[in-house]
Amino acid sequence: MAKYLVIVESPAKVKTIKKFLGTNYEVLASNGHVRDMPKSQLGFDAANNYEPKYITIRGKGDILAKLRKEVKKADKIYLATDPDREGEAISWHLYIALKLEDKKVYRITFNEITKNAVKESLKNPREIDMSLVDAQQARRMLDRMVGYRISPLLWAKIKRGLSAGRVQSVALRIICDREEEINAFIPEEYWTLDAALKIKGEKKPLIAKYYGKGDKKTDITSKDEMDAILLELDKAEFSVADVKKGERTKKAPLPFTTSTLQQEASKTLNFSTQKTMRIAQQLYEGVELKGQGTVGIITYLRTDSTRVSDEAVIASKNYISTNYGEQYAAELAAEKKNGKKIQDAHEAIRPTDIANTPAAMKESLSRDQFRLYQLIWKRFVASRMTNANYETTSVKIDANGHRFTIAASKLVFDGFMSVYKDDEEDKTEGNTFVKDITKGMPLKLEGFDPKQHFTQPPAHYTEASLVRALEELGIGRPSTYAPTITTIIARRYVIKEDKNLYMSELGEVVNNMMKDAFPTIVDVNFTANLEALLDKVEEGTLDWKAVVSNFYPDLEKAVLKAEKELDEVEIADEVSDELCDVCGKNMVIKYGPHGKFLACPGFPECRFTKPYFEKIGVSCPKCGKEVVIRKTKKGRKYYGCEAIPDCDFMVWQRPSTQKCERCGGVMLVKGNKLVCADEQCGFVKKIEEKQQEA
């Protein structure tokens, strides 16, 4: 009987796919890449037309040996790695490493790991797409050029352990530019004036906003201007000058792409980009469902397409019509139109089966998996529903030559909003819908509310807003957003506090050096243009070696110049409030191979060091000192008093700053609840969503 071998990337997929195929099929995993350029060298020969040098990745010998053994037995080999550039490159590397030239080899891709999708892909195999492979090779080599040529320069001029990157250095530049913008910002004063006005017979007043004199919009910039307006309005009679009724439509949202999923998960679930991608990967590769076995419950997670397959459109229309009513089901697919390259082999991120509702999935998923799946499911269902409709009322009110306005709206058909609402949805400025108001109607003034304000600087970037900025600028691709942000935080170029990203001193120094020595590398437009060239390679309209051969000589020239001209930079250590036990100086935080530690700044005269424990902002309930994060000898994390062993307070769960409302004791954070540490007390309190940690 014929035997077929299917090779996937991830071991997690093996079990899921094996279940869909018969006993004739063997399914094995390559565990990601099997070949790469050597770590110890640049990995290509510039003198020999930039030919890359590939070697087997350390530790992959046994995997390849097992795959070669199975290849010999197989009549046909199906390379089923991920449906993107990187997945195509892995298939090509497997083809070379396993010496498949004389074998029947087929490339198959599926956008979701479901029985139908996998079986359909086997019916429609193709050859390896070398344009995709070349685009990935070019990307990998460009990243290597920047990383391997500039990083050693940072080590020599600043400190070891630093890195530069083609995308990460631009992301750092974007954050740094925003910091400079914030620091240079000068606030400007402005005032707003609200008037509480009552219609005769109504109990609740309407809140009208000051517009200006007559039809001319007037900005109030000082208290003197405000006082002059209030003086003119003293004892003025208010009457309705105009009433306009209208309609407003709120469009259904598009289904998620990688970027929009990361942004929404950050905003609503407080997930980091890395956490979002990790959990989405689990949902894509397969989770154990009761009665169904292991099933992939979302489509492929790295995509910038909002396309939805015809089958999914039909299934969603039927589901929505049955469960919500025919008036809620949209007729046509909502698709994003933009001029940029869209990886349209993919679809938007959606549930593989719309009938797998979040409620039905809840018992089979972890808390975080459930929350992300619910977000994806609701967004997709909403994207296939009709728009929401509002009835609007716009009112103009005159008083002694001054004009006030009221804007109010009433939801008349909820459409997609029956499933999916934005946090910022439909704020009506404190007004309920204005019903019985007509032109010429007199209004009674209840009082004024003048308020002083100051213009605010641009907000610091968060992970979500940085992803949005990178996407809008055309920098990086769906697969690069999360690792880019993770790297700049891990390198300590950027500090993350309360979702906001702040530049560290180290980040500023690295960014300044990159701007001085390599202005092209950190230029936003140059990097976006490079991405566009890679897209052309993928389309097969540009030779990949033309891209790398045009890039490298200029980079090499800039590196050689920087090596001669750049001065070394000294980065000051972060000073702590801990005093050296030997000489009494304030100790500094250093970074060693095992993380942070405290060292005396008097080195080498004083060599005293001690462990650094991160404080969590909670006082020890026993002695009043700080509670810090500690680890057992085996590396398990716990929370204990900084005075251990003199004080014996320790708990496994993170203690809260809130005290137990029943006994006054320590409250511990457990999931989305606060639980009293004293089991005899047993007090439990739910944490508000915004307080939950990612």
Image: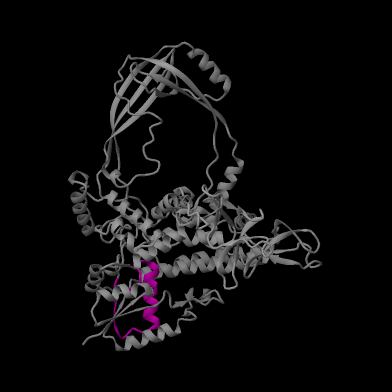
State left or right for residue 595 relative to residue 194.
right
- Residue at 39% in and 81% down: 96
Is 41 rendered above or below residue 653? below
Foreground pick, 354 / 570: 354
- Would residue 285 be visible to someone looking at this image? yes
Residues in magenta? Answer: 80-108
Is 387 rendered above or below residue 255? above
Quarter of the image where the N terminus is located: bottom left
Instruction: Tell me the quarter of the picture where residue 71 sits.
Output: bottom left
- Residue at 57% in and 73% down: 634
Foreground pick, 514 / 319: 319
State left or right for residue 325 relative to residue 668.
left
Foreground pick, 566 / 364: 364
Residue 81 falls inside the magenta stretch: yes
Instruction: Tell me the quarter of the picture where residue 479 sits.
Output: bottom left
State the count of labels.
0
Q: Residue 610 at what x, y percent from top left? A: 70, 66
Q: Residue 399 at what x, y percent from top left? A: 42, 14
Q: Residue 506 at what x, y percent from top left? A: 64, 57
- Residue at 42% in and 50% down: 268
Q: Residue 453 at what x, y percent from top left? A: 54, 30
Foreground pick, 265 / 74: 265
- Would residue 107 be visible to someone looking at this image? no
Residue 138 falls inside the magenta stretch: no
The colour style of the image is one colour
State left or right for residue 88 relative to residue 655.
left
